[in-house]
Image (cartoon, helix red, strand yellow):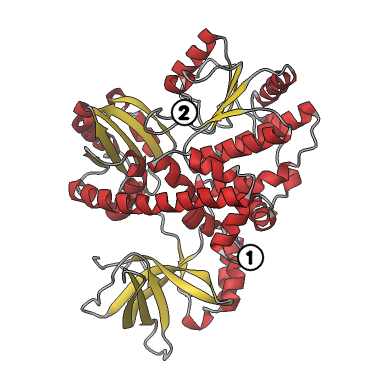
Amino acid sequence: MSKFDNIPLLDKSALFELLTQRFDKEEKKLSQIASPSLLQDAPKAAKKIADTIREKKKITLVGDYDVDGVSSTAIMVDFFRQIPYPLEAIIPNRFSDGYGVSPTVLERIESDLVITVDNGISAIEAANICAQRGIELIITDHHTPSEILPEAYAIVNPKLPTCKYPFKEICGAQVAWLLLGLVKKELNLKIDMKQFLDILSIAIVADVMPLIDINRMLVKEGLRVLMSSSRPASIIIRDFLNKSIITSEDIGFQIAPRINAAGRLEDASIALEFFTATNTNTAYKQFEKLNSLNELRRETEAQTTKEALVQGNCSDNVIVVAGENWHEGVVGIVASRLVDHFLKPAIVLSCENGVAKGSARSVGDVSIYELIKANECYLTKFGGHKMAAGLGLDVNNIDRFRSAINESASKIDPNDFIPLDDLVGIMPSSEIDLELLGLLDNFEPYGEANSRPTFLIKDSEIVEIKLFGKDKSHSKISVRQFSHERETIELILFKKIFKMPDNKKLTCSYRVTKNEFNSRISAQLIINKIYDYQL
């Protein structure tokens, strides 16, 4: 029996029913967000921040170099600017400082209070240094805590087992934003917290938070704010995307990679200066830099992926590869590419001076964090969550670690490794029209836990293949979905050159997106995965 035998034939009303079932309750409103005071230590932290401001003491913020960390920092910087209060904001450099509030970063800080955003839950050494130097430390984070917590004045993290906040799956920027809501109350400020939703929505989407509960509503509202905000960065994003409606996928595929490129390849301060620019001229200049870095990131990533694929052992349960001159900034993306290729969790390590640092990505229902934690005896550091993690180890331990993590993975149910490719059904060609686009729009924003529906095309007859793009690296494939049809439909395969298979048949999954060109809107069919075909 084929795995596609039970895939139903749909029409629009059946699709509407299916998508409606994803949400079991009425959609939440902004006013229904649970009180930030339910976040453990948040009232205490807000009071300390307010007191420090009143006493005119010095506050330093330490962020992180990914989109969530930069967004958290930008929201904080903007909020303090409106008080106004001179906040010093530091985003560590991936290459010279390492992750988070490290001892290296603390060497540069002379402050009364240090606040972390999107990091700090594992900063035990840094917390001890702060205590020795008489610096108060407030940690705000959303990463999974270990058994031992840093000694800090306050730790605000929804994932603390004792935290009563009702919805745990929020990103670092949300934790920071909620805490600022309490600071606003403490200081009796007239700052509208809704104005930060444009940046907040970018963080939620980029950090792959499940788009359910409050996240769904915050992203929906945030994308609306992004369309109308006078923030120079938002104006540049609107100009760049040039669309009547911005979707979560525009953020995920177009904006997030550019924000991320700064911290991956150079310094995240470029992205922070983009978000916090006070005029469009500065924002534009910073965005141009982000664009250039993103191009460089693409080239670097393509070369590293090529080398990593050669190393990968397809008989392993977890792919672990390492390279001497691999750019530390792209190992996470390369790990994702290996997951797509081998359909297994992957760990990609960059080695320098006997030290390996890397990123891990997972697949299906396998927790890469738990697998890494089970083998932490081989590591110098690690952190992360179910689907993604970071780690460091001695180069001499790589082979031992590879064997051990594969041994741990061999005990996992093989079904957990099956990629969650949510095929909703087969959509007749006659149903793929502007009305279908409208129906799909109703269930935006799409993302984690509310994926854009993917449809199946099974054994369709390939009529024509055309290559397009600057370097002819994308494919347009025209197919006749059913033998009785006269009409053909066109599917797009990005970044791959598709060659005509011997049987001239195509079985693939695809998603339907809106294409806006010269003020004309049409349905665009983008291939997700091709089955039974080797590219």
What residue does disc 2 label? 100
Q: Is residue 103 above or below residue 233?
A: above
- Seen in the picture, residue 309 relative to 183 is either above or below; the reply is below
Amino acid type at mark 1: Asn
The quarter of the picture where residue 47 lies is top right
Q: Crowdedness of circle 1 by 10 Å Cα count: few (<14), some, many (20+)? A: few
User: x%, y% of residue 323?
Assistant: 22, 39
Q: Which residue is mark 1?
A: 442
x 38%, y 35%: residue: 390
- Could you say where residue 269 lies in the image, as x and y percent from the top left? 50, 38
**Left/right of residue 33 with respect to residue 484 in the rendered view:** right
| In-image side of 450 versus 384 (left or right) | right
Q: Nearer the viewer, residue 176 or 103?
A: 103
Seen in the image, is 262 located left or right of residue 87? Answer: left
- Out of 525 and 14, give the one closest to the viewer: 525
Q: Quadrant of the N terminus?
A: bottom left
Q: Residue at x 40, y 75 (%)?
A: 491
For residue 92, which numbered disc appears in the image?
Answer: none
Q: Quadrant of residue 275?
A: top right
Q: Are marks 2 and 1 in contact (CB under 8 Å)?
A: no
Residue 326 in view? yes
Above or below — where is 358 with respect to 337?
above
